[in-house]
Amino acid sequence: GLMDALYRDYILEHYKNPRNFGTLEPHDLEWHDHNPLCGDELGVHVVVEDGRVKDLRFHGQGCAISQAAASITSEELIGMPMSEVPGLDAEWVIDQLGIDISPTRRKCALLGLKVMRGATTGDASWPE
């Protein structure tokens, strides 16, 4: 339907013009990981100030969903208290994307949050 088309455009727009992509020097935290199913790889550099995510940059390559999810979530993550990051879950990411993600694409969508949680908590497990 129309909503699906709009959300596909939204994801494509973030894939073509990703927000907060690149590297940050110096940075306080970093993490790098990949999704073996799809070949997506993603790293993150995080700058922390006063207990918040002051700034971050994702870098890497992968499918449209993984790159768009990293871009879309980056805008929410900047400014967030560090203490909130561990509580973010798969549903948080999928809500941000606004489309139904098939089980096979789930890890693509979650890779950005996975590396962000790795960087901030040291827990590299896949978000549930």
Image (cartoon, rainbow, N blue to C red):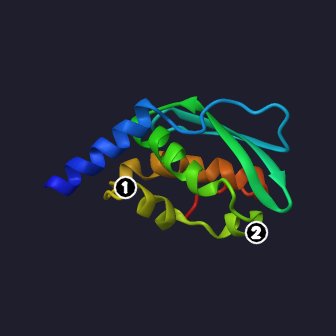
Q: Is residue 41 left or right of residue 116?
A: left
Picture coordinates of residue 40 (x, y %)? 51, 34
108 to 127, vertically: above or below: above
- Front residue of 102/87: it is 87
Picture coordinates of residue 39 (x, y %)? 50, 32
Q: Is residue 119 left or right of residue 61?
A: right
On residue 103, which mark appears?
1
Q: Is residue 41 left or right of residue 29?
A: left
Picture coordinates of residue 88 (x, y %)? 60, 66
**Residue under the image location 35 percent in, 55 percent down:** 101
53 to 128, vertically: above or below: above
Q: Residue lying at the far left in this picture: please name it.
A: 1
Binning the other alpha carbons within 10 Å of mark 1 as few (below 14), some (14 to 19) or many (20 upward) gives few
Query: Where the N terminus falls, by quadrant?
Result: bottom left
Residue designated by label 2: 83
Query: Where the C terminus falls, by quadrant?
Result: bottom right
Element assignment for label 2: helix
Do the CB atoms of the residues marked 1 and 2 lie less than 8 Å apart?
Answer: no
**Residue under the image location 37 percent in, 55 percent down:** 103
Element assignment for label 1: helix
78 to 65, vertically: above or below: below
Mark closer to the chain start, 1 or 2:
2
**Residue under the image location 81 percent in, 31 percent down:** 25
Please say whether residue 124 is visible from this viewpoint: no
